[in-house]
Image (cartoon, rainbow, N blue to C red):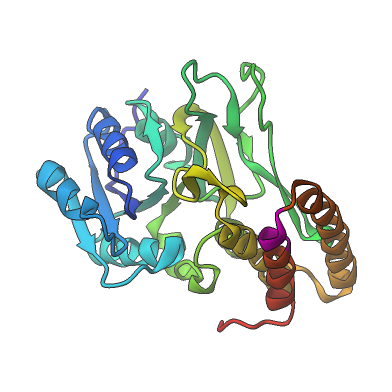
Amino acid sequence: MAAITQPSVAIIIINWNNFNDTQKCLNSLKKCDYPNFQSIVVDNDSQDGSGRKLEDEFKDFAYFIFSDSNRGFTGGNNLGLKYALDQGFEYVMELNNDTEVEPDFITKLIDSIVDKPEYGAAQPLIYFNTPNRHIVWNAGGNYIRPLGISQTKYKNVKDSRFIKASETDWITGCAFLIKSEVIKKTGLLKEFYFFGSFEDVDLSMRIRNLGYKLWFEPSAVIYHSVGGSSKSKTKGKEGYLNPKVHYLTQRNQMIFINHHTPTIFKPVAVLTQVIKLLAYSLYFLVLWRPIKLKMVWKGFKDGLFKTYHD
């Protein structure tokens, strides 16, 4: 059942040298049954012409913003968020460009929190975008505060029938629907995260710190081609995943701990990361990934000692 009210929704998609995935995402959004939404494509200074090519194809469907530099996931989304808030959209959504959506997913998400003032944001059920599309990638997240660890619920589950709608600790940036009144209070994404991870957990924590709850809605469904924007198409000496992604992921983990783990728990959280990195080190040595090994430890050091600008 559709909500009695149909508030305006801005859906922000980042494109960076990835015409094919963004095209698929926009084509799936064109099939959505929700009557009051606008797609906003932020081209992050693509060097392959994909942004202009997408604009030529979808200019009657989406609004395009062209950045003069690659501002990363956080900076690119902030360009879209600022535009959406200036235009008065009542809800804003970050949506990865390597996703495809079910036609009713916006309606289901809006329905899930539109009449619940205690909830500030919501996310859909996300499956891996594989041929049979039945394996769960993300169904909300748990946060273990003393350890500074965020975990994904139900990852790689093949039978989602038992997964129920519920409150969740954090929401993935892959598909993050936020009430505009809430993000005006929290502020935008923290751009020092840039890309990799934890910008979504950080925003989730800031929303919760204001007293709002977060909702997971499994009747709203999308599909995610995981790693479409961070993996190389060809396997190199260091594997498919760019070593910089390992650096940013570990650095962002430590930034997140600095910002959100209570001082009394920080030694435990840091020790947990050291133990994890020792295991990673063994793995990278066995596979002989020396650059990745160096980058994860550099990320740990840079994040721990705050070699970034707040």
Judge by depth and name the residue closer to the eye, 225 or 220: 225
Q: Is residue 13 left or right of residue 227?
A: left
**Is 203 drawn above or below residue 13 in the view shown?**
below
Residue visible at 70% across and 72% down in the picture: 298
Residue 69 percent coordinates (x, y): 32, 72
Image quadrant for the N terminus? top left
Residue 240 percent coordinates (x, y): 56, 45
**Is 142 drawn above or below residue 187 in the view shown?**
above
- Residue 41 visible in the displayed image: yes
Image quadrant for the C terminus? bottom right
Judge by depth and name the residue closer to the eye, 104 or 99: 99
Q: Quadrant of residue 152?
A: top right
* Range of residues picked out in magenta: 289-293
Residue 135 percent coordinates (x, y): 59, 23
Q: Quadrant of residue 68?
A: bottom left
**Is 170 drawn above or below residue 85 in the view shown?**
above
Judge by depth and name the residue closer to the eye, 139 or 107: 139
Q: How many marks?
A: 0
Magenta-colored segment: predominant secondary structure = helix
Residue visible at 24% across and 33% down in the picture: 27
- Residue 209 visible in the displayed image: no
* 292 in the magenta segment: yes
Residue visible at 46% across and 18% down in the picture: 131
Q: Is residue 281 left or right of residue 109?
A: right
Q: Is residue 177 left or right of residue 128?
A: left
* 130 in the magenta segment: no
Residue visible at 53% across and 29% down in the picture: 128
